[in-house]
Image (cartoon, rainbow, N blue to C red):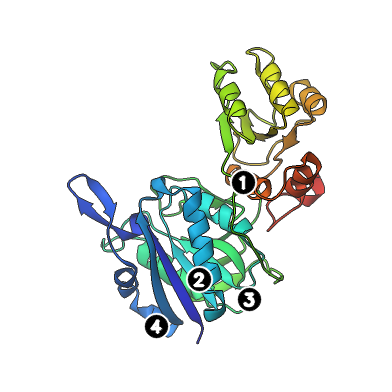
Amino acid sequence: MKKILMIATGGTIACRRTPQGLKPLMGSDELLKYVPDVKSVCHADTLQLYNVDSTDIRPHHWLGIAKAVAENYEKYDGFVITHGTDTMAYTAAALSYLLLSSPKPVVITGAQKPVDMENTDARVNLYDSFVYASEDDASGVHIVFDGKVILGTRAKKTRSKSYNAFSSINYPEVAYVSEGQVRHYIKQEKREKEFFGFLNTRVSVCALAPSMDSGALRYMLENSDAVIIETYGVGGIPAEGGFETAIREAVQKGVTVVITTQVLNEGSDMAVYLVGKQIKEDLGLLEAYDMTHESALAKLMWILARFTKREDIIREFYTPRNFDIYEKKI
């Protein structure tokens, strides 16, 4: 029987009702008691690492989770991390780089309603996560939610309240869990692990809106090592508002600028329109293509913690990691 470590970080799954609203108060041992059938799947131990609403999750929490997995890696066959849903996709992306190519499964799950509610999704999600973490063929970082197994680099929360809260963006779900059984759609090759313990958090995100000028973007460019600009459609920079000048000045100072799209599916392609093609070529901008916003952010933090030369940053950003970017696009 496999040994699985459950690392609890808080979130809705661990919430209790208070006069001020739901607050994470349940401990890891209490959470596990709500899924007694796990005993027939694996031997489970627990570790209470944090107990916070996922709105309060920050990069230092990602590093703490990665450290806890690394420190216990040789003792266990897999890991289940309970987490709030609002920033779960960010954590999944970050762990996909910090725990790169883990041959053991690292499963992240949570719930839209607390585990002690009668009509909660928490107990099924938690049980399914232990089932998947105990699979011989499972490896790497995934979100398990509403039966779906989604790559950590491709997950996004696409519904705020429904039980089917997460979607796999620009990549298929890799497996499905139902009634204690795992159906694999995509078999993943196990590789030698590379673990990392540092991130550069000086990465900002600026979402464009038609009413904006370059003021907010300029501030981010002046106070960051990298900025992701969420543009429209396949990607382009407005001709008015001073955006091109602000970006040009920042790039000349060594700031990394990545263009992505606000559109959920199919990714960017700046070569299509003049407003994208010309400025990308002139300024040497990077493009996220079909990467999720969450993965682009986490990957830049991971890269900039290790590299400062532009050629290294470009190479690493366009190198596919855990299927985060479509290799044929590059």
Q: Which mark is residue 39?
A: 4
Q: Position of residue 95 (x, y in %)?
A: 57, 58
Residue located beneath label 2 in the image: 79
Q: What residue type is labelled 1?
A: Met
Tag 3 secondary structure:
loop
Tag nearer the camera, 4 or 1: 1
Q: What residue type is labelled 3?
A: Asp
Q: Of label 3 and label 1, which has the lower sequence position?
A: 3
Q: Residue at 69%, 44% (x, y): give it.
A: 290
Tag nearer the camera, 1 or 2: 1
Identify whether 264 is placed above or below 118.
Answer: above
* Left or right of 194 in this view: 68: left
Q: Tell me, yes or no, whether the two marked residues, 3 and 1, touch with CB atoms within 8 Å.
A: no
Give the distance between the C-alpha atoms of the residues marked 3 and 2, in whole angstroms.
14 Å
Residue located beneath label 1 in the image: 301
Tag 4 secondary structure:
helix
Q: Position of residue 142 (x, y in %)?
A: 56, 62
Give the distance between the C-alpha atoms of the residues marked 3 and 1, in whole angstroms.
30 Å
Q: Of label 3 and label 4, which has the lower sequence position?
A: 4
Tag 1 secondary structure:
helix
* Left or right of 84 in this view: 77: right
> Mark 2: few, some, or many residues within 10 Å (few <14, many ≥20)?
many
Q: Residue at 50%, 87% (x, y): give it.
A: 1
Q: Of label 4 and label 1, which has the lower sequence position?
A: 4
Give the distance between the C-alpha atoms of the residues marked 2 and 4, in whole angstroms.
15 Å
Give the distance between the C-alpha atoms of the residues marked 1 and 2, in whole angstroms.
24 Å
Residue located beneath label 3 in the image: 137
Q: Residue at 73%, 43% (x, y): give it.
A: 308
Identify whether 108 is placed above or below 104.
Answer: above
* Nearer-the-camera pick, 270 or 251: 251
